[in-house]
Amino acid sequence: MERDFSNKRKMEGLKTKDFINIGIYTVIYIVFIAFGGMLSYVPILLPLVCVLVPLIGGIPFMLFLTRTKKFGMITIMGTLIGLFMLIGGMGYWTLPLCIGVSLLSEYIVKLGDYSSKKKCVIACGIFHLWIIGNILPFYIGDAYYKQVAERFGQTYADGVHAVLPGWMLFVLLFAALVMGLLGGVIGKTILNKNLEKAGIL
Amino acid sequence: MMSDERRKWFIKPKGIILDPRTKLFLLFVMSFFVLGRAGGDNLKYYRFILCLIPFTLLFFMGEKIKACLWFALYISFLGIDIFLADDFEVVIQLFFKIVGDFIMGFIPFLICSKYAIKTTTVSEYAKAMRNMHVPAMIIVPTSVVFRLLPSAIEEIKAINHVMKMRGVSLSGMKRKKFLEYRFVPVASCTLRIGEELSISALTKAYGNGKRTSVSPVGFSFADIVVFIICIGAVVLWFMGIIKG
């Protein structure tokens, strides 16, 4: 039988083993960022969350990227995380943002042919922009501030308004990106050092 | 997991049994209306009805004392919120608002999710999802997540315990190695569990193609009651949007 060395072979679809891998790494990721997730229930701590989560989440994400060799895995993981955020009460914006951002990182990782570590770090930074979905409700319309005022009182809502002025959105966007990149670099270092030793990589 | 052993199809489980689809709908509704407070002040009284569901479920699951205690806590914070809130100074009022928000919002939702995870086996969940024609792309990762999440949390607690004993904590001797000594065991443990899951799933031909299952999945009276209460919340919310 003639051997088929064409590129067609590389474009296999996602199999059950890949889905299971996605589920496993989603669990690890959620467990790592759970601490940040807990903090985000208190609206005043949201800027802190936007900085912590990309940093902590970089490590499990880099671990996940070592197992991603096919297109679509990051997107499914991003969708799952978005769904969890939706159920966890983080608003409607996180889900579409997650999907969009994970598609972007998907393309970046693909550009690096699934083996470029630099591109993986960049994809990590871009992926963690989804955390901005948590503070988007504050910038889109007045309804969310009214809700916060109902839940926590008007003084609290004013306090939140002081912490999140208009330009803060861009600062946090930039911070999330930088922290995501930093988390990716830390993840890459830990992976290089330890897991090659342990034989997992 | 204990629930897996108790929920074999020939063992009748304790408490109110709901179809996995109802549980999923309940979780979405609880997250949207109780955790996320959609609908605002208009739905304040209906939210109380919604919150009765998790406490009832917990009560019939056998944890009667816990259910009563949490319910008492919920009722007291609700009472404080309605009657006494305006009488306090700002600082105390803020404290009660924040803690009350947690207890009246997060706790019922947490009880619901704990109930959902404890009383659903993976095969029931998968069968219910397949009946709704959800693609394998969604079923397999989500069932892995909800099967693995409790085990992963147990592993992490155990690893934290062991590492504390060895002095690798924030106040211990080996402070610099803190991140490494927590992260690598967690990762390798979970990956190992994941590999075993993978193998067992592939052995059961999970995910691809048609499968039959003996898991009992179907709607009952309790499902209808829960469904009506949840739909009521959605309808009221829509009416609120239309009105203003």
Image (spheres, grey):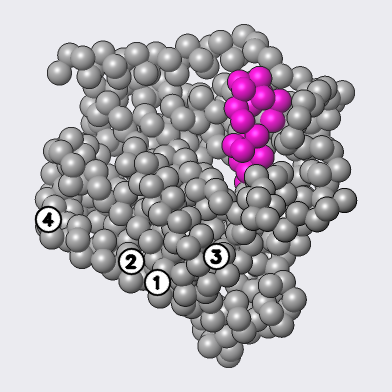
Residue B144 belongs to the span the image colors magenta: yes
Is label 4 or label 3 in front?
3
Quarter where residue A67 is shown: bottom right
Name the amino acid, label 4. Gly
Q: Decide if residue B14 is on the left or right side of residue A76.
A: right
In the image, what residue occupies the spot 71% across and 44% down? Answer: A16
Q: Decide if residue B168 is on the left or right side of residue B85.
A: right
In the rendered view, tell whether residue B175 sits above or below residue B145. below
The residue beneath circle 2 is A177
Q: Can you see residue B55?
A: no
Question: Label 4 to label 1, Cα distance in Å?
Answer: 24 Å
In the image, what residue occupies the spot 38% across and 31% down? Answer: B32
Mark earlier in primary sequence (1, 3): 3
Mark earlier in primary sequence (4, 3): 3
Is label 4 or label 1 in front?
1
In the image, what residue occupies the spot 39% across and 13% down? Answer: B232
Residue numbers of the magenta segment: B126-145
Name the amino acid, label 2. Leu
